Image (spheres, coloured by chain):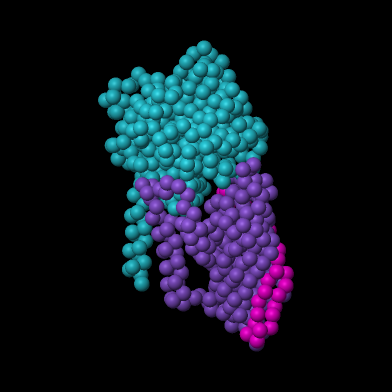
Amino acid sequence: MKKPFLKILIFAFLLQSGGCTIFQEIAGNGPTSFRSPKKVFNKISNPLRNDSRLAMLWIGHSTCLIQMDDKLILTDPVLTTTIGIFSKRVIEPGIETKNIPKLDLISVSHPHIDHLSIGTIEDLCPKNKKVPFVFPEGVESYLPGYDYEYIRLGNRNGYEDLNPVGDSITVGGISVFTVFARHWGGRYGLDGFIWGEQSYTGFIFKYNGLTVYFGGDTGYDPYSFKEIGKRFDIDLAMIPIGPCDDCSGCGNKRHVFPEGAVKIFLDLNARLLVPIHYGVFQFRLTDVNEPLYKFKELIKEYGIESRVSIFEVGEQKSFIAK
Amino acid sequence: MRRQFLIKFPGKRFFASVRIVFTVSLLLLLSGGAHSQAERERTLLKWSSWTLFQALPSPVFFEDKGDNGNGLEFGFEWQVTPVSYTFKPNKYLGHFSSFMIKPVKKFSGSAELFFTPQFSLSGFDYSRVKRYMYNAGVRAYFPLMQGGEYLSFSLGAGYYSQKNEFYSKYDGVMFEAGLYSVFGMAGLKFTYKHNAPSRYNFGLYIKYY
């Protein structure tokens, strides 16, 4: 009885060849579980920039604080020390939760544990009561009834047709569009893997003539990003570049690697690229900055260094001055 | 008469069948790697895999107390939730759920009707009650950490029913308390059955959705 049982177990684990499954996250985080996250020194205490029209503070992974004139948008809020209980941050969040000013918009691209932290949105809620909180359909199944203005947006059943724009709404003057992403939804394993949860999206934010693209988590598609690029004049594109061990190639069906990120950027025809989704959580056994090393090589090859801005966790940059 | 205190564990055949259920469940969970994600919600797969996961038992130790001694019997119980009421769901989710309960609707604060069939693997040698029994009642969950996703607790009360070998019925009031983690899907649970031959039960709580 023992041998067949072991064989089935080994086979099951071999099936886990790619993607950020809960199991890989737990296994990958083994080495970091007993270490404290690396300190971020000189964290910004007041991220509001009166001298800037478009600025961004990288809190880490996919959590970004975007300033568009007088509006503040927080993407994929994760500021907790751990995600999914077991996975620990490699580096602290780039700002203390108490120093995040009252926000104008919070967005969640999908419910995976590295993009939605219940603990974080619980902590942010007292200062942000009734603040618009946008997400693609399906994410509502993972949100407690906190006192935000929850806004569910359509994502065209996971963007199965050729239209890469899902839904849109204007809240507090900020226009929000859900746009094509190729990923998967769910949070607890089966719901995403087998039940086919499609709660994922990318976002376009437009305000006062400024346009920002937030990629969430996505694979590459040769058609859809070009279409998005035709429809929106994008100033800033935040695009995931990981996770990956061997970061050569465009990526897999559900994640882009650095080359895929560069292709998305070129397809979008955006002015500026900020790489995200690396450096904070140990999804693989290799260096968390492995995607960044490859990315730096590629932007030289493609000759786009002047259009790329690489952030340190906790760093804030202004892209367009007043 | 001197009282004995024994702990009994189940035999090989039982563990073999548990391994099969575990393995099939694990395969279902793991077989959809990132490269083969579903493109749209698969209702049949959803309900069939959920049903299979409900078959995963929660291991429990039962007190076994009789005139001739005391023992601790090993067994299993299953968690069935016919109705759940979420105290404060978001505006897109209703207060009520039935059987398949979204974890956030449970661990963020809820009350539910529960039905818990229990089975002792080795039987009750001292109290001579039947291997099969059940509890049913109401329990409420309260979040402790990270909205309850990291840690939540429950308190409950209800009715228990057991029969002995001569089909005499023991029933009465039971109380329980639980502490849960891992998205509310795993925890520790303690049950007290007033005046029952198997008064104290202690074990794990395992329930996927």
Residue A246 at x, y = what percent?
30, 40
- Is the residue A2 above or below the residue A208 in the image? below
Q: Which corner quadrant holds the N terminus of chain B? A: bottom right
Task: Examine the residues drawn in magenta and state their main secondary structure.
Answer: strand
For residue B186, side relative to residue A266 (left or right): right
Q: Which residues are magenta?
A: B149-173
Q: Is residue B152 magenta?
A: yes
Residue at image coords 39%, 30%: A225
Is A243 situated left or right of A63 in this image?
left
User: What residue is shown at x 29% (from left), y 37% (from top)?
Assistant: A249
Q: Residue at x 45, y 27 (%)?
A: A213
Residue plotted at (69% across, 80% down): B169
Count of marks overlaid on the render: 0
Residue A312, visible in the rendered structure: no
Question: In the image, is residue B69 above or below residue B139?
Answer: below
Does the stretch in magenta take in B30? no
The purple chain is B
Colour assigned to chain A in the rendering is: cyan
Give whichever of B192, B21 is nearer the camera: B21
Q: Position of residue A320 (x, y in %)?
A: 47, 15
Q: Which picture quadrant has residue B59? A: bottom right
Which quadrant is the C terminus of chain B positioned in?
A: bottom right
Residue B107 point in image, percent of width and height: 61, 51
- Where residue A128 sits, quadrant-wise, is top right
